[in-house]
Amino acid sequence: MTIMQCVRRQWPALAVVAAAIGAGCSGGTEDPAAGTKRAAASDFTIPAAGAPFTPKPLTTDPNVALTNMVQSYKEPQTFYAQSEATIVITSGGKQKQSRQQIIVRSRRAPDSVTLHVRDTESGTQEVYADGKYLVTYAGTSNEYKRRNASGDMLALCRQIDKYAYQVMSPLTFLQSSGVPEGMSDLKYEGLKTVDRKEVHIVSGRLSPSYIKAAAKSIFNAANLEPAPSAFRVWLDKSTYVVHKIGLTLAWKGTQAAGEEAMALKNPAISILEVVRAVVPNSKMADDSFKFTVPVGARERFVESSE
């Protein structure tokens, strides 16, 4: 799941926490001309698969199940993932909801990643990392930033995390060697049929230290204390790739609005994400990982503090 960052001073900003990715936080209607010129990352056509995921033995151990999940995402030379998510954000008794369509593409040799999000509140958001540059783009403002960003897959995913915070997404799994960071008190709930698919169900808590760090990354709020937070994930019976995931992230405390902070009171984020496709080893053109400047787009130059 991708939670993009946008610092705002008023309550409506909570509806667009999934916004801006460092490119420009202004809201409004997305420029249609810009939308017609998007690069390959914005194409929601599911590609043809290449070599399939390697099947893995059945297990009832939740640690093994989650490790199998991570291994499946790290195994292919390329992968394409498409999902849809509903996000409900609560603060001070008020609630906002948004919906996202998400595409993640990754490729090894050369290591490259793209992330494309369509959000009902904040429009089109994109991140491109091709091993040389990292570009973040916001469709509502039609602005982008370009940063030098070299490194291997691990380094690229960590850099993307700074501008598009990842919570149990494919980019999270690419950074993991076993059970992803923050998952604790794991429970295997069984092998069941969900949406006409046989899936393993694993649940657990998100650790207080993980939730504390997430408050800083999502809200730029260092003074919020962790409240009970949990996850449940549905994994393919054979490959252990994610079919569906539910998350609740919660905090206790308040934060006054400031120059780089939004007003908050006991905030919580509830997420339900359903994966529509995970495609291993598909053919990916170099253009899939290159940012094409949209019509009329404005570059915002990176400040030294960023």
Image (tube, rainbow, N blue to C red):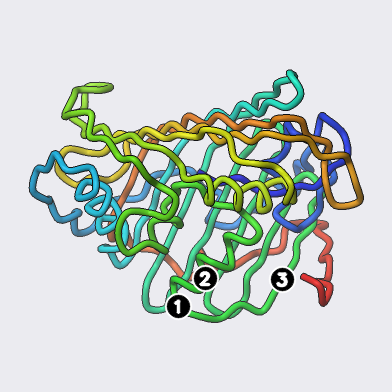
Residue at position x 68%, y 52% from top? Answer: 216
Determine the residue positioned at 44% across, 47% down: 168
Between residue 95 and residue 138, name the one nearer to us. 95
Q: Is residue 277 above or below residue 69?
A: above
Residue 183 coordinates in the image, percent (x, y): 39, 46
- The residue closer to the viewer here, 292 or 198, is 198
Q: Residue furthest top?
A: 93
Cα–Cα gap, marks 2 and 3: 14 Å
Residue 108: give x, y in percent of width and height.
37, 72
Reading the image, the residue beneath label 1 is 152
Mark 2 vs 1: CB contact within 8 A = yes
Cα distance between the residues tagged 3 and 1? 18 Å
Q: Nearer the viewer, mark 3 or mark 1?
A: 1
Identify the residue at the far left of this view.
Answer: 57
Say if 196 sits above or below 111 in the image.
above
Q: Quadrant of the C terminus?
A: bottom right
Foreground residue, 106 or 218? 218
The secondary structure type at the circle numbered 2 is helix
Residue assigned mark 3: 146
Q: Which label sits in the foreground, 2 or 3?
A: 2
Query: What is the x, y in percent for residue 4?
Result: 65, 48
